[in-house]
């Protein structure tokens, strides 16, 4: 089975004062998804946006909002984010060790698409149970930088994780996030990722 390629510009590099027009601009330029980085200042040392901002943006776009939750209290975010209009709900495996089954169930029952993300230091095996579960996640996000900020340097060693995942799960959506741009995309694509998040490389490009 073929997986569909997706490009997801990261709104972390958007002009936050002009979210709607930035979203239009990205979708008009051919973006498939809009990657929304939700950070709580606890799981990562940065604070960004939450459901109210997603709700405001949703009024201006029908686009797929690929929400990446870098937060600790994941269960608390499902309902508000659904109501706000989130499309994908990707949570970190590091903060869902004890409740991922309940979380996946809740995300699906609210009509969003569940994904699981892992930090560079987290072994790839930690996500297998979530992909192989009776009620599985539908995407794995491999972080290629430490989460928290845009504009960091891509960690090429993470490509081993992507290679292993693609071999094991031919039809799974595999997303890479952090430091992706013209000099690193080929590397990631050649080992099997099909969803590319790109923040600074998109927004800094002429
Ligand atoms: C970082 C975020 C990324 C970030 C990527 O923690 O998850 O989505 O915006 O930005 P770039 O592409 O600049 O590394
Ligand atoms: Zn992200």
Image: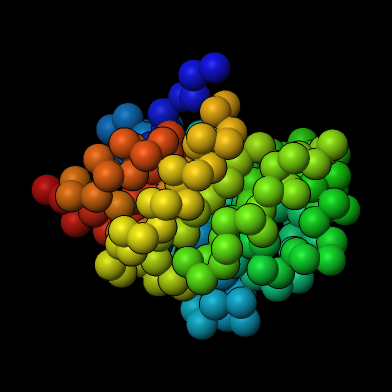
Q: Nearer the viewer, residue 56 or 140?
A: 140
Q: Nearer the viewer, residue 177 or 8?
A: 177
**Outermost residue, top side:** 1
Q: Which of the colour schemes (rainbow, by chain, secondary structure, one colour) is used? A: rainbow
Question: In the image, is 6 to the left or to the right of 71?
Answer: left
Q: Nearer the viewer, residue 177 or 46?
A: 177
Image quadrant in which you'd find residue 32: top left
Question: In the image, is 38 to the left or to the right of 149?
Answer: right
Q: Position of residue 197 (x, y in %)?
A: 40, 48
Image quadrant in which you'd find residue 122: bottom right
Q: Does residue 147 lie above or below 167 as drawn? A: below
Question: In the image, is 137 to the left or to the right of 139?
Answer: right
Residue at (84, 61) in percent of width and height: 99
Image quadrant in which you'd find residue 16: bottom left
Q: Position of residue 96 (x, y in %)?
A: 75, 64
Q: Position of residue 60 (x, y in %)?
A: 51, 40
Q: Is residue 26 visible?
A: yes
Q: How many marks?
A: 0
Ligand 1 located in image quadrant: bottom left
Q: Is residue 65 visible?
A: no
Residue at (77, 66) in percent of width and height: 97
Say which quadrant the N terminus sits in. Answer: top right
**Outermost residue, left side:** 206
Residue at (75, 49) in percent of width and height: 129
């Amino acid at each position: 089975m073929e997986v569909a390629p997706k490009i997801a510009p990261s709104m972390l590099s958007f002009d936050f004062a002009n979210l709607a027009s930035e979203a239009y601009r990205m979708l008009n330029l051919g973006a498939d998804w809009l990657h929304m980085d939700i950070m709580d200042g606890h799981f990562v040392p940065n604070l960004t946006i939450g459901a109210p901002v997603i709700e405001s943006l949703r009024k201006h776009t029908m686009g797929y909002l690929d929400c990446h939750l870098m937060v600790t209290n994941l269960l608390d975010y499902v309902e508000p984010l659904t109501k706000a209009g989130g499309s994908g709900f990707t949570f970190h495996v590091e903060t869902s060790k004890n409740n991922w089954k309940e979380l996946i169930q809740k995300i699906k029952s609210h009509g969003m698409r569940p994904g699981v993300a892992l930090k560079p230091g987290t072994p790839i095996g930690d996500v297998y149970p979530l992909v192989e579960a009776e009620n599985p996640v539908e995407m794995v996000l491999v972080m290629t930088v430490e989460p928290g900020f845009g504009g960091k340097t891509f960690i090429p060693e993470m490509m081993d994780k992507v290679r292993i995942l693609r071999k094991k799960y031919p039809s799974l959506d595999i997303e890479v996030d952090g430091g992706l741009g013209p000099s690193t995309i080929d590397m990631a694509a050649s080992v099997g990722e099909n969803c590319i998040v790109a923040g600074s490389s998109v927004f800094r490009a002429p």
